[in-house]
Image: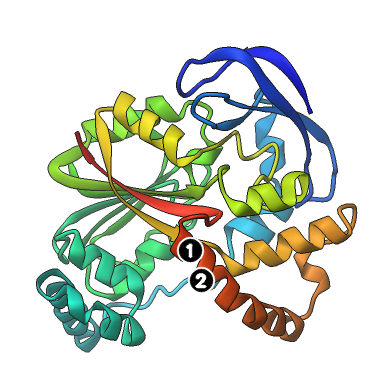
């Protein structure tokens, strides 16, 4: 770590910010990159964005990180659609019922109900990848879904009515949305402020932007440092803090309405592996059974970190401010 006079791309602070060297680990190249952490807003950001950034998103990275899980492309089941409507209404009208509802249904349904989202709401998933989350929403009866991603390849006509996935970026957006989702996208953006401002222009007056991202003012960052799995150089260009997200929101005509913290058990386990053997410790070296045992031991500990608001990830609910 050293100091050098640099300008923060989020708050504009120009100072001798602390500098760090981080290694690419997920793909196993162990190439080194310089980052700096803003002395004012705390945003951890890469000094120089690689001109060939696309090569760091090759197949091994997508296979291990971006494309986990199996797509459900089946049509909507009427019973499931009806249950989805019931959960959305219940979460909106009776917040006390949420604890019970989350035991039976996905937590995101309760979140959307709390936000006043229903199955007719216009929803954009920006940086949607292959659209896994959109297919889940469609399965619960949502009918106005758009996914936009600059890297996705839509090779065939989607069989789902009311669900569209397109290759492209914010410059191709049209229309207004009640909910815009940036799920672990903002840390990958070369110009986060520009994209947030564009999202603001396509948000309804009562709408919400949900930004989920790692936090560089978390216990995980302080504990693991260079071995923190959520650092992920050079793909993560900007790692926000709560303060820097508030600054970015304000500069984009938005404000933080709510923060949900998430310690992320898998990420914690990966960080531990990197710290034990940074040149070879990949999550794939552990069996599923070993990972399961390890995560159970972590569960209570990580819940405490969530309660303290010191988790290594968070979801920010942004409203027009």
Mark 1 element type: helix
Above or below residue 213? Residue 142 is below
Where residue 67 sits: x, y (%)? 58, 61
Where residue 78 sits: x, y (%)? 19, 85
Q: Residue at x 53, y 43 (%)?
A: 151
Is residue 12 or residue 53 the one in the foreground?
12
Q: Residue at x 72, y 62 (%)?
A: 270
Quadrant of the rendered structure where residue 160 is? bottom left
Mark 2 element type: helix
| 154 relative position to 64: left or right | left
What number is the disc on residue 303? Answer: 2
Q: Residue at x 70, y 67 (%)?
A: 269
Which residue position holds label 1? 306
**Whether residue 175 can be seen here:** no
Is residue 307 or residue 203 the one in the foreground?
307
Disc 2 crowd, CA 10 A, few/some/many (<14, 14-19, 20+): some
| 77 relative position to 290: left or right | left
Q: Residue at x 45, y 53 (%)?
A: 314
- Quarter of the figure with the N terminus: top right
Where residue 28 sits: x, y (%)? 84, 50
- Quarter of the figure with the C terminus: top left
Above or below residue 136? Residue 172 is above
What number is the disc on residue 95? Answer: none
> How did the renderer colour the structure?
rainbow
**Whether residue 43 can be seen here:** yes
Distance of label 1 from label 2 (alpha carbons) = 5 Å
Above or below residue 187? Residue 301 is below
| 102 relative position to 2: left or right | left
Is residue 220 or residue 205 the one in the foreground?
220
Is residue 185 or residue 92 the one in the foreground?
92
> Badges 1 and 2: C-beta atoms under 8 Å apart?
yes
| 117 relative position to 273: left or right | left
């Amino acid at each position: 770590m050293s100091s050098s006079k640099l300008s923060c791309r989020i708050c504009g602070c120009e100072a001798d910010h602390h500098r760090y060297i981080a290694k690419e680990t997920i793909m196993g190249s162990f190439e080194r990159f310089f980052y700096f952490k803003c002395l004012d807003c705390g945003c951890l950001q890469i000094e120089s964005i690689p001109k060939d950034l696309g090569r760091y998103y090759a197949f091994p990275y997508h296979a291990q990180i971006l494309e986990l899980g199996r797509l459900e492309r089946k049509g909507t089941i009427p019973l499931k659609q009806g249950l989805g409507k019931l959960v959305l209404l219940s979460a909106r009208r009776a917040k006390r019922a949420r604890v019970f509802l989350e035991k039976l249904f996905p937590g995101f349904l309760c979140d959307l109900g709390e936000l006043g989202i229903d199955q007719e709401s216009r929803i954009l998933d920006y940086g949607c990848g292959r659209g896994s989350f959109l297919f889940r929403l469609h399965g619960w009866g949502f009918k106005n879904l758009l996914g936009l991603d600059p890297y996705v390849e839509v090779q065939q006509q989607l069989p789902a009515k009311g669900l569209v996935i397109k290759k492209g970026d914010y410059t191709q957006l049209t229309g207004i949305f009640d909910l815009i989702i940036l799920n672990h996208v903002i840390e990958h953006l070369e110009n986060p402020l520009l994209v947030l401002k564009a999202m603001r222009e396509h948000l309804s007056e009562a709408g919400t932007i949900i930004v989920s991202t790692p936090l560089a003012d978390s216990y995980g960052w302080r504990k693991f440092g260079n071995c923190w799995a959520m650092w992920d150089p050079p793909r993560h260009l900007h790692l926000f803090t709560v303060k820097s997200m508030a600054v970015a929101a304000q500069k984009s005509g938005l404000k933080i309405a709510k923060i949900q913290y998430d310690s992320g058990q898998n990420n914690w386990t990966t960080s531990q592996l990197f710290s034990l053997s940074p040149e070879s410790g990949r999550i794939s070296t552990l069996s599923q059974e070993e990972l399961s045992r390890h995560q159970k031991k972590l569960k209570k500990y990580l819940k405490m970190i969530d309660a303290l608001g010191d988790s290594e990830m968070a979801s920010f609910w942004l409203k027009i401010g």
